[in-house]
């Protein structure tokens, strides 16, 4: 991408509210004194440091100030660097909407974050992984080679990005301290170059922020708090400038866009393709690039994964971070267009519009605030990025080499924590100096955005190995090595080297004619692929070769035992519980050796503390009694991994214990054991569940049995009572007659007739009890035939009419002339009808009694209702009438009823699939009814 | 002076036979057909002895017994429970409620007459 174009605005008369400035006027504008800018900058850095210090102090006492989803989400905005702050405006001023994909990518990524990032967090926390290099190396069998390669790619790839930050802040400083439109005089010698000192100052701050002490989890609470604060500062500053430009200089958004549309060259910026070939391809490439970068950039990994306090915070970040991006992008176009409209042909770099527009309007304080915002963007990025990379350089590049030497390796003693910190500090300074070097070599020739994209394309190379490693068990170390190496070479050849060539540091011949003059080796038209812009071209080739190599090599050769075990641990991280977590190790270890080893890298006290905690956890009284097993070795290795990376930790642990080589069979055996253990515990759980279930069922059954037993008891007791009552009368009366031969004839006759009726009552009762028992036990005989209900009612009425006459009661039958036949047992139905009719007549008033029988024929079946004009039955007693031996109070002649009539009737009706009910209101008589359905089959025939 | 006996039973025929029996033994007889009538009759007539059926409408024999014993004026009235259930628990419950004796239905008229006589003599 070229440096921003400066539009020549020829017809200023068209722009109404433009202050309309021409060449020559710019010298009049204000600038700020260098001491002021420097003082403010330093003050701001010290405030940040104070926040970080406070955060660390609070963390030590356990009152974390970053344990908030808001802080987590805001710290993620470390994504927005000087590139966003200055570069986006510059890009918008030359390419319009094309600044957007870099922010659309992260927004899309965050939608998927819950899947991918959560898994990364879980893996990193479980295995104490503290960098991308460690993540990849650990996944592919803790390979030191892979860790080193990833580190080198990172350093080479990120150096331009750091250079970008240095360039931004140095040109920002120039804008602040030189007259607007004037040109800063380049330093005569390199040691006069302020940018160099800026790099060193940043290195100093990074060392203070990041390497004050060594922690096995590599977490920096204070740093995260400071980063979150910086995110707020840069957003507020950028919004302030945006509001000033939009509403202070112009008349709102619509005004700016209206004015911009009036000028053909600027209007062109607001269109999508702007004459680009493959515009959509390029848009897609940029979006994809940003999607990958927001996850795989070292600083994003550090903040999102390593510094994450709680997985749940991700839920908030998923919408807050995209919202932040949206806010910081709202004013990009207005500021870019405003700058173009305002400065016109004046030689003002569009990338510094954020500073120059307020300065040009005499808003020095706003400009200073904007500069602090830019400083925030720069320092946030540099500090986090460089800490992350220095950890990688130390753990994954330097330590594995050092530890192989006799001096540090094997069983030598000595505390290495100081050495570790020293290496990291040197690495920090080294990385920043490299960044300065790149700035010095290539910085001037490139816009901020172009430099940043080179870095993005480099970290995108991690995607296949990372994502494959998390979701594909068959990915191997050799596959990852091949993919990364080829992808990186392709990136270097098609993007990095051309950038150096264009800056004039190496010959551009290979650019124009291809390497060795071979046409199809042209870096920007590889294999003849022409027409794409150089970034899309490079991204396509590097990722394509990367993925193909990764997959092909992975499938070509079987992974080793160690790779297989790590693959399983990573891919199935969510399925593994602590209990059934397999530990892939076999050999012999000594607690003292391991304690000593841990002490060397983490300090004696810390190591003692860790082992004491571990002893407690496994139930040992003291450190000496800790079982020397695979779990202990795994524990030590995991903690060392936090401090020196997985590859180094592997080497160190291997040096103090006697290991037996792990074969693929062993891995399978261990897995088998773990899965057996899991299956066993699952089976146990299932068994206890089913036992519980069975217990519950038994309890219910027992309750039912008990209640049945109670029912039976009650029934027996009731039957006994009902039998004894008539027997009592019979016995008493006969005895009285026997003892008294001279009893009066009349008295004797009365007694005899009572004895007869009580005897009848007894036999009726015995019959009904037997009947009931038979029906309930299912032994009753049923003789079904097609019966005419009307005829049955007539028969019943005839047989009971005597009682009605006695009580002077009227009996009416209401029915259609013809009622269709229904399948039922005629005798049983007559039993039901007589029962209902005799019940009804017992309750009607003497001489005024009236009982009606209603018969209704319908498709579904026949309904019969017996309605009396008696006293009615209270609602609470209506249910009781269908229970055995429940006789309704007020019955005039108890001897006639047995308390079984209604229950038997109901059983009969229900046997034919019907139902029986009672409707009654106190004082309004009662209506007993039943419904008999027409049956499709002859179910009722069964006997 | 002849003693008064209250007979409470909801079975009409049992009432008839008991009334005949007690009158023949020379007692004055008052009858009640349910628990409430029994309570009313006891407080009104202050009988010397109550033949009290357990299973009666409105109030059971147990309830009546309990009320009588709780009443300071009536508490010394003799109560003989008549039960058709005859289970040990029913008898025990009756005695616990303060009955002086119990008779299981169906009973021997001679034995019942003897029992009533004994109870009144002891009193």
Image (cartoon, coloured by chain):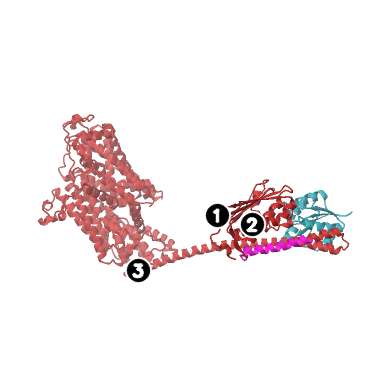
Chain colours: A red, B cyan
Q: Is residue A637 above or below residue A3?
A: below
Q: Position of residue A675 (x, y in %)?
A: 39, 66
Say which residue label 1 marks.
A860
Q: Which mark is residue A668?
A: 3
Earlier in the chain: of badge 1 and badge 2, it is 2
A732 or A128: which is nearer to us? A732
Residue hosting label 2: A791
- Going from the N terminus, do you reach mark 1 or mark 3 first? 3
Quadrant in which residue A272 is drawn? top left
Taking the spot 71% from the left edge, 54% from the top edge, the residue there is A801
Q: Is residue A803 left or right of residue A467?
A: right
Q: x, y percentage for residue A303?
A: 32, 50
Q: Tell me which segment is drawn in magenta.
A: A755-779
User: Are there few (<14), some (14-19), or many (20+) residues within 10 Å of tag 3?
Assistant: some
Q: Chain of mark 3?
A: A
Discs 1/2, front: 2
Q: CA distance from mark 1 to mark 2?
A: 20 Å
Element carrying mark 3: helix
Q: Is residue A772 magenta?
A: yes
**Mark before the other along the chain sequence, 3 or 2:** 3
Residue A44 at what x, y percent from top left?
Answer: 30, 41
């Amino acid at each position: 991408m070229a440096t921003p174009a400066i539009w020549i605005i020829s017809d200023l008369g068209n722009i109404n509210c433009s202050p309309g400035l021409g060449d020559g006027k710019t010298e009049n504008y204000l600038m700020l004194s260098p001491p002021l800018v420097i003082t403010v900058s330093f003050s701001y850095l010290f405030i940040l440091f104070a926040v970080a210090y406070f955060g660390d102090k609070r963390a030590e006492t356990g009152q974390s100030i970053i344990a908030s989803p808001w802080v987590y989400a805001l710290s993620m905005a470390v994504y927005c660097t000087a590139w966003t702050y200055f570069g986006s405006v510059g890009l918008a001023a030359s390419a319009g909407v094309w600044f957007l994909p870099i922010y659309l990518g992260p927004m899309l990524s965050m939608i998927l974050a819950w899947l991918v990032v959560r898994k990364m967090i879980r893996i990193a926390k479980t295995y104490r992984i503290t960098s991308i290099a460690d993540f990849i190396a650990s996944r592919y069998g803790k390979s030191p080679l892979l860790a080193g390669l990833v580190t080198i790619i990172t350093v080479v790839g990120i150096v331009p990005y750091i250079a970008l930050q240095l360039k931004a802040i140095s040109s920002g400083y120039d804008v602040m301290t030189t007259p607007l439109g004037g040109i800063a005089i380049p330093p005569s010698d390199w040691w006069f170059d302020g940018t160099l000192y800026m790099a060193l100052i940043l290195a100093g701050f990074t060392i203070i922020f990041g390497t004050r002490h060594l922690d096995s989890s590599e977490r920096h609470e204070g740093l995260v708090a400071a980063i979150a604060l910086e995110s707020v500062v840069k957003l507020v500053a950028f919004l302030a400038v945006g509001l000033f430009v939009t509403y202070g200089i112009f008349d709102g958004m619509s005004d700016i866009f209206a004015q911009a549309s009036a000028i053909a060259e600027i209007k062109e910026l607001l269109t999508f393709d702007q004459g680009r070939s493959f515009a959509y391809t390029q848009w897609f490439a940029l979006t994809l690039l940003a999607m990958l970068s927001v996850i795989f950039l070292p600083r994003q990994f550090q903040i999102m994964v390593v510094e994450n306090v709680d997985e749940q915070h991700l839920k908030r970040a998923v919408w807050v971070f995209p919202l932040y991006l949206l806010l910081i992008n709202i004013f990009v176009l207005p500021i870019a267009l405003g700058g173009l409209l305002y400065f016109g042909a004046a030689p003002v770099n569009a990338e510094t519009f954020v500073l120059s527009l307020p300065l040009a309007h005499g808003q020095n304080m706003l400009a200073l605030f904007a500069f602090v915002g830019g400083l925030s963007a720069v320092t946030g990025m540099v500090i986090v990025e460089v800490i992350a990379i220095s950890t990688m350089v130390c753990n994954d590049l330097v330590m594995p080499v050092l530890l192989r030497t006799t001096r540090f390796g094997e069983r030598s003693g000595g505390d290495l924590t100081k050495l570790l910190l020293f290496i990291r500090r040197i690495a920090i300074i080294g990385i920043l100096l490299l960044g300065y070097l790149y700035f010095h070599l290539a910085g001037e020739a490139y816009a901020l955005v172009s430099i940043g994209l080179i870095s993005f394309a480099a970290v995108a190379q991690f995607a296949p190995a990372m994502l494959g490693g998390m979701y594909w068990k068959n990915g191997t170390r050799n596959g990852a090595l091949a993919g990364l190496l080829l992808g990186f070479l392709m990136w270097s050849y098609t993007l990095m080297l051309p950038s150096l060539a264009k800056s004039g540091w190496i010959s551009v011949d290979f650019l124009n004619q291809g390497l060795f003059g071979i046409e199809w080796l042209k870096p920007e038209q590889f294999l003849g692929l022409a027409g794409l812009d150089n970034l899309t071209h490079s991204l396509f080739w590097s990722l394509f070769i990367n993925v193909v190599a990764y997959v092909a090599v992975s499938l070509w050769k079987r992974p080793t035992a160690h790779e297989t075990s790590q693959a399983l641990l990573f891919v199935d991280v969510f399925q593994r519980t602590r209990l059934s977590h397999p530990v892939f190790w076999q050999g012999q270890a000594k607690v003292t050796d391991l304690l000593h080893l841990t002490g060397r890298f983490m300090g004696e006290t810390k190591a003692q503390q860790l082992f004491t905690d571990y002893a407690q956890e496994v139930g040992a009284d003291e450190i000496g009694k800790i079982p020397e097993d695979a779990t202990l070795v795994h524990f030590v290795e995991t903690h060392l991994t936090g401090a020196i990376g997985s590859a180094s930790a592997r080497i160190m642990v291997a040096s103090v214990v006697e290991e037996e080589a792990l074969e693929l069979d062993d891995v399978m055996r261990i897995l088998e054991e773990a899965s057996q253990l899991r299956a066993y515990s699952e089976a146990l759980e299932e068994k206890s569940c089913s036992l519980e279930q069975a217990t519950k069922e038994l309890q219910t059954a027992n309750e039912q049995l008990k209640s049945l037993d109670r029912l039976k008891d009650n029934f027996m007791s009731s039957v006994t009572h009902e039998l004894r009552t008539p027997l009592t009368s019979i016995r008493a009366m006969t005895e009285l007659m026997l003892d008294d031969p001279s009893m009066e004839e009349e008295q004797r006759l009365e007694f005899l007739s009572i004895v007869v009726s009580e005897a009848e009552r007894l036999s009726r009762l015995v019959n009904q009890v037997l009947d009931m028992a038979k029906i309930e036990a299912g032994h009753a005989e049923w003789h079904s035939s097609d019966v005419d209900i009307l005829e049955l009612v007539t028969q019943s009425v005839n047989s009971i009419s005597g009682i009605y006459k006695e009580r002077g009661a009227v009996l009416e039958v209401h029915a259609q002339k013809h009622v269709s036949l229904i399948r039922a047992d005629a005798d049983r139905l007559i039993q039901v009808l007589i029962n209902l009719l005799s019940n009804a007549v017992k309750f009607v008033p003497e001489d005024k009694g009236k009982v009606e029988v209603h018969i209704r024929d319908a498709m579904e079946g026949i309904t019969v209702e017996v309605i009396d004009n008696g006293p009615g039955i209270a609602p609470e007693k209506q249910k009781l009438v269908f229970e055995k031996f429940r006789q309704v109070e007020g019955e005039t002649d108890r001897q006639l009823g047995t308390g079984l009539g209604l229950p038997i009737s109901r059983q009969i009706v229900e046997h034919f699939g019907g139902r029986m009910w009672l409707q009654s209101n106190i004082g309004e008589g009662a209506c007993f009814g039943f419904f008999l359905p027409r049956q499709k089959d002859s179910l009722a025939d069964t006997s | 002076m002849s003693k008064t006996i209250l007979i409470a039973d909801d079975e009409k025929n049992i009432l008839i036979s008991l009334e005949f029996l007690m009158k023949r033994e020379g007692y004055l007889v008052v009858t009640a057909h349910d628990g409430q009538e029994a309570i009313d009759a006891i407080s009104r007539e202050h009988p010397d002895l109550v033949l009290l059926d357990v299973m009666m409408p409105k109030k059971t024999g147990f309830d009546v017994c309990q009320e009588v014993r709780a009443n300071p004026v009536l508490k010394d009235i003799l109560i003989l429970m008549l039960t058709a259930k005859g289970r040990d628990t029913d008898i025990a419950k009756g005695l616990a409620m303060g009955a002086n004796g119990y008779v299981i239905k169906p009973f021997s008229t001679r034995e019942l007459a003897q029992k009533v006589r004994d109870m009144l003599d002891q009193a």
